[in-house]
Amino acid sequence: MPDCDEFPNLYFPNSEGKFAWDDPCWNDDWEHDLRSKGFNSLWYWENGERRTVKKGEKGRYLPCARETVFSRSQTISMDDLDYDNDFNADSESYFKTFEEAMSWSKNNPGKTFTRSPNGKGFIKK
């Protein structure tokens, strides 16, 4: 009578003395379920869909895939972001160059500046 069992390796430990189900990724179906529900990595959202994760959103870490995934509702389209309206470039609190910001800081002891939110220029802190 032939051996009809398709998985004989499940009944015996491997050379390290561990069974197949000792692997933490033995039952990673829940990770695949999250993927099928639309959870994707940051790389996928930024490069595939041109979306970015909203500020403060916490993703789900997938230990077997070794990455953090986010749902579509946790992201926003990069086209919807309006970087130019984060500040008024004509206001007194905006500096186009580091030298302008440094000069202002030297003339105003105790005052500081930082990079503007969109990465263009500097603003008063």
Image: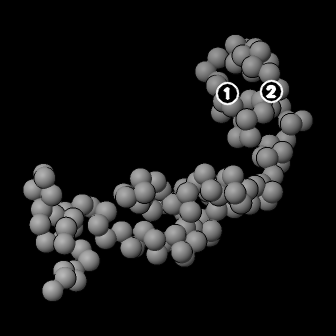
Q: Residues within 10 Å of mark 1 (few under 14, many from 20)?
A: some
Instruction: Give left or right: position of 39 versus 66.
Output: right
**Residue tagged by mark 2?**
95
Instruction: Give left or right: position of 123 versus 37.
Output: right
Say whether marks 2 and 1 touch (CB < 8 Å): yes
Element carrying mark 2:
strand
Q: Give the residue at x 56% y 62%.
A: 40
Residue nearest the observer in this picture, 3 or 111 = 3
Which amino acid, by three-letter code, is at mark 2?
Answer: Phe
Q: Which mark is residue 102?
A: none
**Residue tagged by mark 1?**
113
Q: Quadrant of residue 36?
A: bottom right
Residue farthest front in this picture: 1
Residue nearest the observer in this picture, 8 or 32 = 8
Residue farthest right in this picture: 90
Tell me the CA gap for discs 2 and 1: 9 Å
Element carrying mark 1:
strand
**Which percent across, then down, holds residue 43?**
60, 51
Instruction: Give left or right: position of 75 versus 78.
Output: left
Residue nearest the observer in this picture, 118 or 7 = 7
Mark 2 vs 1, N-terminal side: 2
Q: Residues within 10 Å of mark 2 (few under 14, many from 20)?
A: many
**Which percent across, then down, holds residue 65?**
42, 57
Residue nearest the observer in this picture, 91 or 74 = 74
Q: Give the residue at x 79% y 18%.
A: 100
Q: Quadrant of the C terminus?
A: top right
Residue farthest bottom in this picture: 1
Please determine whether, in this image, residue 40 is positioned above or below residue 34: above
Q: Give the residue at x 45% y 62%.
A: 60
Q: Quadrant of the N terminus?
A: bottom left
